[in-house]
Image (cartoon, grey):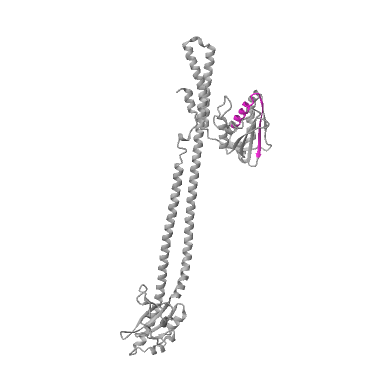
Amino acid sequence: MSLDQQASASTGPLKPSDSNIMDPSPIEVSRKTCHLASGMIVVALVVLSAVTLDLFLAYLRSRQRDLLLDELQEVRAQAVRTVGRVEQFLEARSKADWDDLAEAGLLDAAQQWVARDPARYAYAAVVDVGGVLRWHTDRRQWGEQLGREWYESLARDLGVDVVRTRDEILAGGRAVYDLRVPIVHDSRSVGSYHLGLSLDGFAERWMHERRGILIRYATRAVAMVLVFAAAMWSLYFLSTRLLRLQKMATRAYMRAAAELGRLAAGLAHEIRNPLHAVRLNLHAFRRAQQDPGTLEPAEVARMLQQSSQEIDRIDRLLGQLIHFASPDDPRVEGFNLNAELEGIIDFISQELRRSNVEIQLDLPKSPASVRMDRARLRQIMLNLLHNARDAMPEGGRIGVRVMREDSRVRILVSDEGCGIAEADRPHVFEPFFTASTDGTGLGLALVKRFVEEAGGQIRCHPNTPRGTQFVIRLSEASHSASTGSARR
């Protein structure tokens, strides 16, 4: 393959298929991973909620049973104390005389205890071995006979002495837990003492306690839900942020790859032309070696000088490319922009006059200050001024104007040249894009980089009535910073 063919092949655009920059698999994998993680958290939250609810219901049942056992324990303790007093009374008698027991007032305490909280305690009663009510808190029931099926069921989980009943005679039709304690006289059971715990009253007390439990646990549940919601929102935010960052990184990588492709294409194009000229000269020298009379000494000298210039051009191009790829670190400082621009104009004015170019500097009365690298500002302005001069080969006028607006400073550099075509204007800051036959196309690309690294912006506009205008916007530095820098 010839040198021209190699250069042409190298200038081809970088296709997406040449690399993995278009491969969406990292983003897809991340999206699937985020969705999977979110789904697992939701499933875990549902399972945890179900388990927590089941444990909470079990706790409620356990707490209800504990509360009932505490109530029955209190009833049992009262019944045992009452039975103890009754048995002591009966010890002095040959037989159980229930009438004397009622008249002796031994059951007055039980009567008062039940009357103190009738919603809680349904009744207290003494029943003999024959099932006859010898005493009852409802005096109308004295002497009534209990039926054989006076209770509905045993409550063995609450104790062997507890049954559930709705007996009309004993409980008046109310649902109660009946706790009975046997009364012993002469080593034999002569009856039993009964205390009834109202199920309705217990249900009311349980409702009150359950309300407090629900409030406490609802507060904790709400806190847990908020924590999980915050976790889910954080996961969603992080996942979407991750996807966004990955897309931005992919787009940035694609732009960088495209920029690298354009850079490589431009570099190959810029190197190909001088190499082509050197190759033609070498071919001419080869023919002259075979036939010494074909070239005059002056022609040989001209071709040698041309080859040397083309080699110097390649060397200069590579130097600019190295400087563009890895510029020196900026030395940021605040300084007086007015004074700096005056120095730059004084430096270049003689060179511009030789090209029949005048420069007009318009500065604000109040000095404007910026914070950036002085050397870079100098390089920016010299590049723009040289480009403006080259755009006016017959001479003309360059305008440099500084304007202050709020917290920013605008620098306008305008010429009266042929201008830049509207289709080319968006590409003027791209590497190797140039309309000049001698330019490399790296100057404005480097200018744009320096301005943006200083936190500014640069735009290209058509000038009125003709020519081109470059507008640079920089942040204005504080007066103290610029003054301090100037003193150093």
Query: 33 or 376, which is in the foreground?
Result: 33
Whether 128 is drawn above or below 385: the answer is below
Q: Residue at x 46, y 68 (%)?
A: 210
Tell me: 184 left or right of 10.
left
Whether 380 is drawn above or below 210: the answer is above
Question: Is residue 487 among the parts visible in the rendering?
Answer: no
> Which stretch is magenta?
380-404
Quarter containing the N terminus: top left
**Measured from the top left, where is residue 294 in percent x and y?**
51, 11
**Measured from the top left, where is residue 384 in percent x and y?**
61, 30
Tell me: 103 left or right of 240.
left
Whether 338 is drawn above or below 57: the answer is above
Quarter containing the C terminus: top right
**Measured from the top left, where is residue 395 in percent x and y?**
66, 25
Query: 386 or 164, which is in the foreground?
Result: 164
Tell me: 80 left or right of 234.
left
